[in-house]
Image: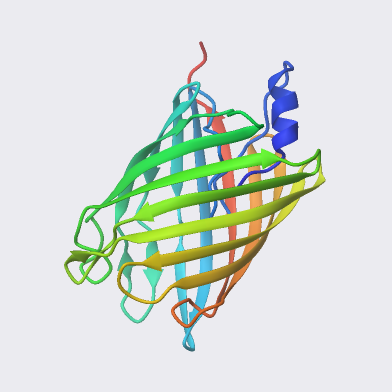
């Protein structure tokens, strides 16, 4: 999620460290990378209700390491799903390259990644599933930011890749220097199967410049989407190397 874009730009021009910016809790990733030589961990838990059945999953961990000023490596660790059949999901690896700032005040990045069939037999897709994401953002004022993401996924389903396009758009409002909230729409459009539409709300609070907690909830707007979910998360950032 993009938070305090204006504050980030101001901080980058001063000696003070910029505050943590995370990809969670929104579907839309942040449009910038983590600072070089920095490790960032983003974690969360969710309870989802679909057709009267509750599903728990966590810790939804994404680890991001800055290898250059505009490049990061990414590791998504296996998520545990607690359903009728429980187990760990697949591991994913990738990278994120920041392309912006672009003309017009836009920040843009591209994420290239793939999941690996490392999960439990009943949970894993049993395939190598590549995906690409293009998150963007633009500050509208000191307190308002527009952001979105265009993505293409290729999950393995029944032994075949089901190419799925996704679009997401959000409006973020800075409430205080350390607190913001957003409203977001996300839609998945698979090659096979019905579209999935989601309305999403959330808030994030920076405990320190390197720590963040978040709370968010969503409701499905189509029959192929889960009925609703509620989730919370914690993110942190540490400097690994000092040059």
Give the image's coloring scheme: rainbow
Q: Nearer the viewer, residue 105 or 70?
A: 105
Q: Is residue 4 above or below residue 164?
A: above
Q: Residue at x 53, y 47 (%)?
A: 29
Q: Residue at x 49, y 89 (%)?
A: 52
| Residue 21 percent across, percent down from the top left | 61, 39
**Residue 23 appears left or right of 207:** left
Q: Is residue 26 visible?
A: no
Q: Quadrant of residue 229?
A: bottom right
Q: Is residue 52 above or below residue 219?
A: below
| Residue 37 percent across, percent down from the top left | 48, 22
Check the image and name the residue furthest to the bottom.
Answer: 52
Check the image and name the residue furthest to the left.
Answer: 159
Q: Quadrant of residue 220?
A: bottom right
**Residue 56 appears left or right of 209:** left
Check the image and name the residue furthest to the top.
Answer: 243
Q: Nearer the viewer, residue 36 or 196?
A: 196
**Residue 223 appears left or right of 7:** left
Count all numbered tags in the image, as a single digit.
Answer: 0
| Residue 77 percent across, percent down from the top left | 37, 50
Q: Nearer the viewer, residue 125 or 5?
A: 5
Q: Is residue 239 visible?
A: yes
Q: Residue at x 29, y 61 (%)?
A: 155
**Residue 92 appears left or right of 221:** left
Q: Residue at x 28, y 68 (%)?
A: 123
Q: Is residue 36 above or below residue 51?
A: above
| Residue 80 percent across, percent down from the top left | 38, 63
């Amino acid at each position: 999620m993009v938070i305090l874009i204006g504050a980030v730009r101001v901080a980058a021009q001063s000696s003070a460290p910029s505050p943590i910016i995370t990809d969670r809790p929104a579907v839309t990733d942040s449009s910038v990378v983590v600072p070089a030589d920095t490790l960032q961990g983003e974690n969360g838990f969710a309870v989802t209700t679909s057709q009267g059945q509750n599903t728990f999953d966590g810790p939804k961990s994404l680890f991001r390491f800055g290898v250059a000023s505009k490049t990061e490596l990414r590791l998504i660790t296996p998520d545990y799903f607690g359903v009728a059949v429980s187990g760990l999901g697949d591991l994913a690896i990738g990278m994120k390259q920041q392309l912006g700032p672009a003309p017009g005040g836009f920040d843009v990045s591209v994420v290239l990644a793939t999941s690996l069939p490392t999960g439990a037999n009943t949970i894993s897709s049993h395939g190598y599933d590549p995906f690409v994401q293009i998150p963007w953002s633009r500050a509208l004022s000191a307190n308002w930011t527009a952001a979105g993401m265009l993505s293409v996924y290729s999950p393995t389903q029944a032994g075949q890749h089901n190419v799925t396009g996704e679009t997401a758009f959000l409006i973020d409002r800075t409430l205080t220097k350390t607190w913001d909230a957003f409203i977001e729409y996300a839609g998945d459009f698979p090659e096979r199967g019905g579209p999935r539409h989601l309305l999403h709300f959330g808030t994030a609070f920076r405990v320190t410049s390197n720590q963040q907690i978040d709370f968010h909830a969503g409701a499905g707007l189509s029959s192929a989407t889960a009925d609703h979910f509620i989730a919370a998360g914690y993110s942190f950032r540490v400097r690994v190397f000092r040059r």
